């Protein structure tokens, strides 16, 4: 039996806005109740608060972030974990696409101390380091590789990230979790250190997001006939393009929303199949959702990350 400090066992994650998706998001200013910090680890150093260290002197979004102690360097021989339990969408018959993304910094003894992410498909009995999970797609360049092992032989983030890096992991529809009929998965973040103290800061995380698509509600044929779209480059650094199926040059409308469901941008009378946009439309870094509405009310949904 595992007990968690601060948060109740089996607590229903708070659900924020997302079209056609269940979404768990926190910037740690509030509503991080879906996280569970493992209190069976007697010296668990994960804290939500205002970082006040030499290297980690602020959160990405002020004032709070999740960090391996807000003030002190990480201690020796430490193991600190937190978990997120993700429920299968009530309206879905099976798992579909699941996305994990966050922004982070780390400063550890390179190849000795670090942090890694695991997933359990069987309620916490067996764990797979996500880099070993063949059912997911790593969508960015900043993730650790299988060869980036730390003390104990586990692949992990280690060394000095120097800046905030965006991380996205996607479990795709049609593979991986879609094959499971289980009710939930658990994602675990663990920080570990060896016996040599070097006064480093550890791991700092902000803007943590999880999306679980309930796209399995339709039949296979309905899914495959759905119109598709893509955003590139994604994450967005500067200008970017939303490209979508519009072979009949139909008159479409584009709407873009932030995580709170507030409309940030709208464009009407689009008859092309590409929309060029600038990053300067958006005030804040993070995930945005778009909706393209066709005259017959068919809509295409997607998301992108402003970096
Ligand atoms: Ca924050
Ligand atoms: Ca060390």
Image: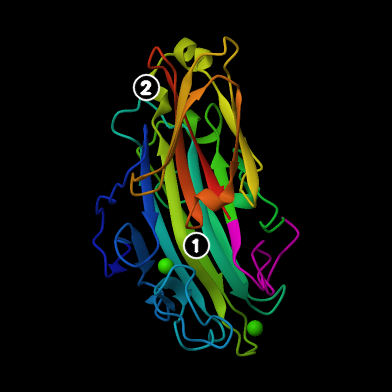
Residue 138 or 75: which is nearer the viewer? Answer: 138
Q: Which of the colour schemes (rainbow, by chain, secondary structure, one colour) is used?
A: rainbow
Q: Which residues are magenta?
A: 146-166
Q: Residue at x 47, y 45 (%)?
A: 288
Residue 281 position (above or below residue 134): below
Q: Is mark 1 within 8 Å of ligand 1?
A: no
Residue at numbered disc 2: 217
Measured in 3D between alpha carbons, the distance from the residue under mark 1 to the one under mark 2, in whole angstroms, is 30 Å
- Quadrant hosting residue 184: top left
Neighbor class of circle 1 (other Cα within 10 Å; few <14, some 14-19, many 20+) is: some
Q: Is residue 127 visible?
A: no
Residue 209, horizontal then vertical, whole percent: 44, 52
Task: Say whether residue 200 is magenta.
Answer: no
State the quadrant of the N terminus.
Answer: bottom left
Residue found at x 43% / y 71%: 65
Residue 54, how many percent across, how many down? 56, 88
Q: Which residue is mark 1?
A: 189
The answer to whether 138 appears left or right of 18 in the picture is right
Tell me if residue 78 can be seen.
yes
Outermost right residue: 147
Task: Say which quarter of the image contains residue 175.
Answer: top right
Magenta span: chief secondary structure? loop
Q: Secondary structure at mark 1?
A: strand
Question: What crowding class fits label 2: few (fewer than 14 Cα within 10 Å), some (14-19), or many (20 or more)?
Answer: some
């Amino acid at each position: 039996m595992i007990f968690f400090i601060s948060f109740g066992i089996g607590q229903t994650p708070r659900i924020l806005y997302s079209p056609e998706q269940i979404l768990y998001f926190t910037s740690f200013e509030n509503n991080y109740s879906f996280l569970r910090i493992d209190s069976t680890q007697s010296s668990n150093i994960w804290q939500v608060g205002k970082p006040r260290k030499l290297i980690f002197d602020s959160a990405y979004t002020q004032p709070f972030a999740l960090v391996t102690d807000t003030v002190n360097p990480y201690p020796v021989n430490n193991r600190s974990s937190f978990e997120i339990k993700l429920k299968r969408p009530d309206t879905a018959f099976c798992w579909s696409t699941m996305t994990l993304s966050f922004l982070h910094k780390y400063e550890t003894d390179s190849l000795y101390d670090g942090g890694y992410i695991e997933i359990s498909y069987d309620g916490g009995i067996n764990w797979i380091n996500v880099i070993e999970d063949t059912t997911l797609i790593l969508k960015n360049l900043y993730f650790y590789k299988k060869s980036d092992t730390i003390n104990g032989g586990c692949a992990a983030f280690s060394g000095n990230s120097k800046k905030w890096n965006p991380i996205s992991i996607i479990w795709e529809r049609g593979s991986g979790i879609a094959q499971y009929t289980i009710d939930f998965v658990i994602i675990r973040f663990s920080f570990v250190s060896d016996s040599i103290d070097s006064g480093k800061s550890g791991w700092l995380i902000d803007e943590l997001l999880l999306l679980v698509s309930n796209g399995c509600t339709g039949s296979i044929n309905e899914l495959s006939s759905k119109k598709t779209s893509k955003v590139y480059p994604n994450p967005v650094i500067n200008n970017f393009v939303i490209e979508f199926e519009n072979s009949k040059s139909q008159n479409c409308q584009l709407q873009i929303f932030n995580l709170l469901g507030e409309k940030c941008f709208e464009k009407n009378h689009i008859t092309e199949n590409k929309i060029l946009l600038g990053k300067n439309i958006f005030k804040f870094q993070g995930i945005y959702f778009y909706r393209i509405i066709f005259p017959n009310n068919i809509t295409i949904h997607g998301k992108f990350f402003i970096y």
